[in-house]
Image (cartoon, rainbow, N blue to C red):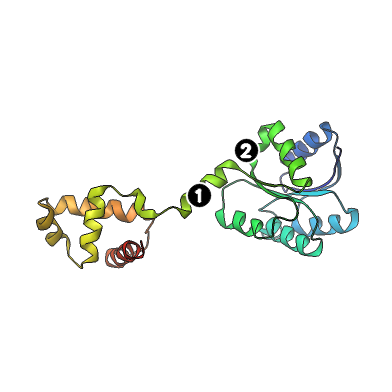
Amino acid sequence: MPLTVVLAEDSPLMRDGLVGVLTRFGHQVLAAVGDAHALVTAVQEHHPDIVVTDVRMPPENTDDGLRAAVLLRHQHPTLPILVLSQYIEQSYAAHLLDLGSDTGVGYLLKDRVSAVGEFVDAVAQVAAGATVVDPEVVRQLLNRRRDPLQRLTPREREVLSLMAEGRANAAIARELYVTEAAVSKHVSSILQKLDLHLDGQGHRRVLAVLTYLRA
């Protein structure tokens, strides 16, 4: 079923490509704009079936497109919105999905647009009221919710357990009958796997222990 679309994308080449794809599949692009302010204006003027918008756009070139989408959703609660992003931003996806599931919403990586059939199908699904999220975004969201300690080896868990008892590397080495260099290597691996990238080794050790205790 043909849809009326308002499209927002700051790259002229990408914008023209999206217009061409949508038109080729029978949809009517009522407006194709290059910034968030123009997007809001175009929706107010044309009342489309669906909005397709990039996340990063002028005027600030941060998350203007997403913020415009959220504003439009509040102004038009039944307006389906499909957001495109160059990179995976879990906070963007979470924010968008927080808009609710009563009306269609989608979050796709721009790479998915090259698979024309998948992109057009996503547009149709969102317009019909479905929630469509890029499979890679789903994978990363799921990984974020997994127990971070599952990433550790059994030996690293032992080292972390001893760290939680307040033991220094030398004491851990004696307990496990390994060298201090080996313990230091395990500690570095633990901090990396738990995504602890703060400055200061001591502070990071405390955070690692807190992660262990919470689990």
x and y percentages locating residue 48 in the rendered image: 86, 50
Quadrant of the drawing holding the C terminus: bottom left
Give the label on residue 189, or none: none
Give the label on residue 142, or none: 1
Residue at the (60%, 57%) spot, across then down: 94
The residues tagged by marks 1 and 2 sit, at their Cα atoms, a distance apart of: 20 Å
Q: Is residue 171 left or right of residue 5?
A: left
Residue at the (81%, 61%) spot, across then down: 76
x and y percentages locating residue 140 in the rendered image: 51, 48
Amino acid carrying label 1: it is Leu
Give the label on residue 111, or none: 2
Quarter of image, res 184: bottom left
x and y percentages locating residue 185 in the rendered image: 22, 50
Q: Relative to 87, is 70 above or below? A: below
Q: Relative to 144, is 166 above or below? A: below
Amino acid carrying label 2: it is Asp
Residue at the (57%, 52%) spot, across then down: 89
Q: Is residue 188 left or right of residue 57?
A: left
Quarter of image, res 114: top right
Q: Secondary structure at mark 1?
A: helix
User: Is any atom of residue 12 visible in this view?
Assistant: no
Residue at the (52%, 45%) spot, across then down: 139
